[in-house]
Image (tube, rainbow, N blue to C red):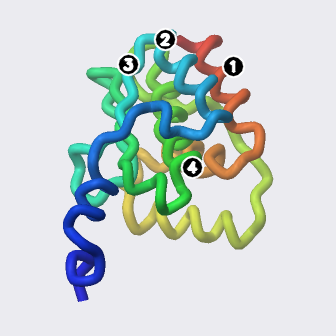
């Protein structure tokens, strides 16, 4: 059964339509402001990569967050993940590791490892591991704001 067989077309269209940044939770607004102050642009719109919840494009300094992440309840994780890549792109525009690590629950660590092996080129795995690790941390927003100010 397809989504359109279950949901009316208008509901699907409104869920996927671009959204204003004000739709993001209040606790993420300081991160949005920090990104913008460093020259990054953020859009709540479908990323130009099919099936992606988020995307960061270093060349244009643009972050996309799919509007679908809002009703799915994963907008925070998605924005934090893409913001990590933005911080990784400073100061040169080439993504380099930030050097972050965290003690993770072994189940979470195995899940991240499985995602990395299944979905990412080995050359990007260190960068992606940092992003996946930070997206689940309680202090992710202040940590990222500090990194953006230090690196960008």
Per the model, the C-alpha gap separating discs 3 and 2 is 12 Å
Which residue is tagged 2? 38
Q: Which of marks 1 and 3 is in front?
A: 1
Above or below: residue 34 compared with residue 80: above
Per the model, the C-alpha gap separating discs 1 and 2 is 12 Å
Q: Earlier in the sequence, mark 3 or mark 2?
A: 2
Which residue is tagged 1? 146
Per the model, the C-alpha gap separating discs 1 and 3 is 18 Å
Which residue is tagged 3? 93
Which residue is tagged 4? 77
Q: How crowded is mark 3: few (under 14 residues within 10 Å), some or many (20 or more)?
A: some
- State which quarter of the image contains the N terminus: bottom left
* 48 left or right of 24 in image: left
Instruction: Find out whether the residues at labels 3 and 4 contact each other: C-beta distance under 8 Å.
Output: no
Of residues 71 and 56, the one nearer the viewer is 71
Q: Which of marks 1 and 3 is nearer the N terminus?
A: 3
């Amino acid at each position: 059964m397809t989504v359109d067989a279950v949901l009316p077309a208008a509901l699907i269209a409104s869920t996927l339509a671009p959204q204003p940044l004000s739709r993001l939770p209040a606790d993420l607004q300081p991160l949005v402001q920090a990104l913008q102050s460093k020259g990054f642009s953020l859009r709540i719109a479908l990323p130009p990569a099919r099936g992606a919840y988020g995307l960061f494009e270093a060349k244009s300094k643009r972050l996309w967050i799919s509007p679908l992440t809002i009703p799915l309840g994963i907008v925070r994780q998605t924005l934090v993940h893409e913001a990590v890549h933005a911080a990784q792109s400073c100061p040169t525009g080439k993504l380099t590791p930030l050097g972050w690590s965290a003690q993770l629950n072994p189940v979470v660590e195995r899940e991240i490892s499985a995602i990395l092996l299944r979905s990412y080129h080995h050359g990007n795995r260190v960068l992606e591991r940092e992003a996946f690790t930070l997206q689940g941390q309680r202090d992710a927003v202040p940590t990222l704001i500090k990194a953006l100010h230090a690196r960008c």
